[in-house]
Image (cartoon, grey):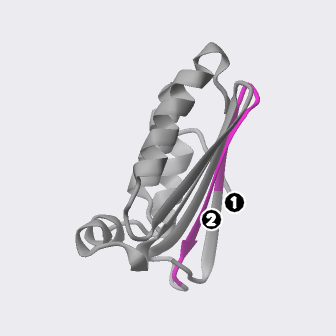
Amino acid sequence: MKRNIIFLTVFVLLLAGCGGKKLTCTYEDNGDKETIVMTFDRSGENLVRMEATSVEDYGDMAEMFYGFAKEACDEMDEPGMSCSISRNGNVITSRMTIVIDKLDEAAREMFVDGNNMSEVRREAEEDGYTCR
């Protein structure tokens, strides 16, 4: 469950559009996998787009978590953000895309300051992700 919170936090903290440099960070644990592809502008100073995918086996909690996540995803009505959730047995796959240029002003302000590529990479690796 802690990994889920970290994954959702990364969604919120690392918003992103289209740009020049890409950073791909992955986390794997007991068959579960999270991948976050972040696109920065050509200078690497500003995050412009993020695509995140999580594939996790929730065991007996899959139905409950799927219902919660599906409802949250279905209710998401934010410009610049889209998500999808699917379930195959106990395995839940979630995908989220964030395009910073399409966010409203308040959300954009929250994500453009201090999210340069090297800082994002350092923070992700401190959280156990492998970045390339």
Q: Which sits in the foreground, 60 or 2? A: 60
Q: Quadrant of the C terminus?
A: bottom right
Rendered residue at 45%/35% (across/down): 5
Question: Would residue 53 be found to the left or right of residue 81 on screen?
Answer: right
Q: In the rendered structure, which amino acid carries the disc numbered 1?
A: Arg
Instruction: Classify 109 as above or below 61.
Output: below
Q: Quadrant of residue 36?
A: bottom right
The residue labelled by disc 1 is: 132
Element class at badge 1: loop
Could you tell me which residue is drawn at 34 percent across and 71 percent down?
112
For this orientation, the residue located farthest to the top is 60
Q: Position of residue 3 (x, y in %)?
A: 53, 32
- The residue carrying mark 2 is 23
Residue 60 belongs to the span the image colors magenta: no
Q: Which residues are magenta?
A: 25-41
Identity of the residue drawn at 56% across and 47% down = 125
Q: Is residue 72 left or right of residue 104?
A: right
Residue 35 is marked as: none
Q: x, y percentage for residue 82?
A: 51, 61
In the depicted structure, whether residue 34 falls above or below residue 44 = above
User: Rounded to the nearest whole Å, what is the CA distance between mark 1 and mark 2?
Assistant: 6 Å
Q: Could you tell me the amino acid type at mark 2?
A: Leu
Q: Which residue corresponds to the image point at 46% horizontal and 32% vertical from the top-left?
A: 68
Instruction: Tell me: residue 48, above or below residue 23.
Output: below
Contact (Cβ within 8 Å) of mark 1 with mark 2: yes
Question: Could you tell which of marks 1 and 2 lies nearer the N-terminus?
Answer: 2
- Callout 2: few (<14), some (14-19), or many (20+) C-alpha neighbours within 10 Å? some
Viewer-closest of 4 and 40: 4
Closest to the observer, 53 or 43:
53
Residue 89 visible to an observer of this rendering: yes
- Numbered disc 2: secondary structure: strand
Q: State the image coordinates of residue 26 (x, y, percent, origin top left).
A: 67, 48
